[in-house]
Image (tube, rainbow, N blue to C red):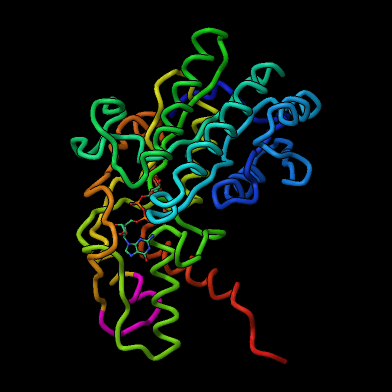
């Protein structure tokens, strides 16, 4: 078992982005620790405004900061709004890292994404593949911002001795996900499509692209558990992949979702929509060596998220 070098007991822990899927999972996970969780509403703290972030951090004085705030979205949102993805993510990470430095925060955990790696990186992708080749076009802006975040952490560690660690989660899903058909990631999009097809009695549901790209998925509660684990035991400049270790073709995922939802019609692909990167399975070896393994299988995870999704639907009119 890895040694705890940063015990959370009695610490003030700031979760930036606590309303998001990852941030809210982190809050749920941290509630099991003996720490004080600090959050800030968007009305109280605009992470895009440097002076506000510096002032807030100086007053809140957290010991540990999780940078779970980010502009995120699926393949279409990324491809059509590159300015938002690049600008907002650069600002959020730069403001938080610099403010944490000024306020003397003891530890900062930065969150990136598996899309930081080259489009055609050898699989499974090890952490050392960073910056070894061209990126996938559909999410280049987001990837560049997240690569800058990793480098920012490395630079502050090198120049200021700041304890910043970086974790790169794979495609995450879970409660609190975005189910909007245009901007969501594939898994929530498929849950919604299958649900609506079932309710509408449709004979088929349509998925984007060829259905052949392979993707790795991790339940956000597993991701949050890994992040808390890393916060406690890890302190080094090298970023760490956070994945489930297995991937599957999007078409297989669509069938798995359809089964969980109970949609029995046909699944048709729409190759006019982008596929994105052909495969991005990350190597989980570094994290395994650090003593962590995922717990929630994909079928079980999808079923539980569908139940969560159903609970969010408006009930029948009284
Ligand atoms: O999850 P997703 O939007 O993003 O799409 P990426 C994954 C794959 O699912 C692509 C296909 O091949 C899509 O064409 N797909 C099929 C669908 N049907 C749908 C659908 O209805 N909606 C969506 N969204 N996809 C994202 C990046 O890449 O991964 C982000 O854009 C981030 O920057 C995230 O890194 C983790 O996996 O391609």
Residue at left offset 34%, top offset 75%:
258
- In the depicted structure, whether residue 298 falls above or below residue 206: above
In magenta segment, residue 265: yes
Picture coordinates of residue 306, whole percent (x, y): 47, 71
Residue 17: image quadrant is: top right
Residue 251 horizontal side relative to residue 193, left or right: left
- 28 and 248: which is toward the camera: 248
In magenta segment, residue 280: no
Picture coordinates of residue 280, whole percent (x, y): 27, 44
Picture coordinates of residue 121, whole percent (x, y): 21, 35
- In the depicted structure, whether residue 72 falls above or below residue 303: above
- In the depicted structure, whether residue 150 falls above or below residue 228: above
Residue 98: image quadrant is: top right
Residue 4 horizontal side relative to residue 290, left or right: right
Q: Quadrant of the C terminus?
A: bottom right
The total of numbered circles placed on residues is: 0
Residue at the farthest right position: 59
- 225 and 203: which is toward the camera: 203
Residue at left offset 59%, top offset 23%:
6
Residue at left offset 45%, top offset 56%:
173
Picture coordinates of residue 273, whole percent (x, y): 29, 62
Q: Quadrant of the N terminus?
A: top left
If the picture is divided into quarters, which one holds ligand 1? bottom left
What's drawn in magenta, residue-wise? Answer: 257-266
Residue 52 horizontal side relative to residue 197, left or right: right
Residue at left offset 22%, top offset 65%:
271
């Amino acid at each position: 078992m890895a040694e705890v070098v940063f015990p959370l007991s009695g610490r003030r822990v700031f979760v930036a982005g606590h309303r998001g899927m990852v941030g809210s999972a982190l809050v749920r996970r941290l509630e099991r620790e003996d720490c004080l969780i600090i959050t800030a509403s968007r009305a109280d703290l605009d992470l895009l405004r440097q002076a506000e972030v510096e002032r807030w951090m100086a007053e809140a004085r957290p010991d540990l900061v999780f940078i779970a705030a980010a502009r995120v979205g699926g393949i279409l949102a990324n491809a059509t709004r590159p300015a938002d993805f690049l600008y907002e993510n650069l600002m959020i990470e730069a403001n938080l890292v610099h403010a944490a430095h000024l306020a003397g925060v003891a530890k900062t955990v930065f969150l990136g994404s598996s899309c930081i790696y080259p489009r055609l990186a050898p699989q499974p992708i090890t952490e050392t593949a960073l910056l070894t080749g061209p990126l996938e076009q559909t999410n280049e802006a987001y990837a560049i911002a997240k690569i800058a975040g990793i480098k920012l952490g490395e630079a502050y560690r090198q120049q200021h001795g700041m304890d910043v660690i970086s974790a790169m989660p794979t495609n995450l899903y879970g409660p609190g996900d975005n189910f909007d058909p245009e901007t969501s990631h594939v898994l929530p999009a498929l849950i919604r499509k299958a649900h609506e097809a079932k309710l509408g009695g449709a004979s088929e549901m349509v998925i984007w692209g060829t259905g052949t790209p392979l993707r790795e998925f991790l339940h956000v509660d597993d991701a949050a558990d890994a992040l808390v684990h890393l916060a406690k035991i890890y302190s080094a400049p090298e970023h760490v992949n956070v994945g489930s270790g297995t991937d599957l073709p999007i078409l297989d995922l669509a069938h798995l979702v359809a089964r969980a939802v109970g949609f029995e019609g046909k699944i048709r692909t729409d190759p006019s929509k982008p596929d994105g990167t052909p495969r991005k399975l990350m190597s989980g070896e570094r994290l395994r060596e650090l003593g962590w393994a995922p717990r929630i299988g994909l079928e079980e995870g999808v079923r539980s998220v569908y139940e969560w999704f159903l609970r969010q639907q408006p009930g029948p009119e009284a």
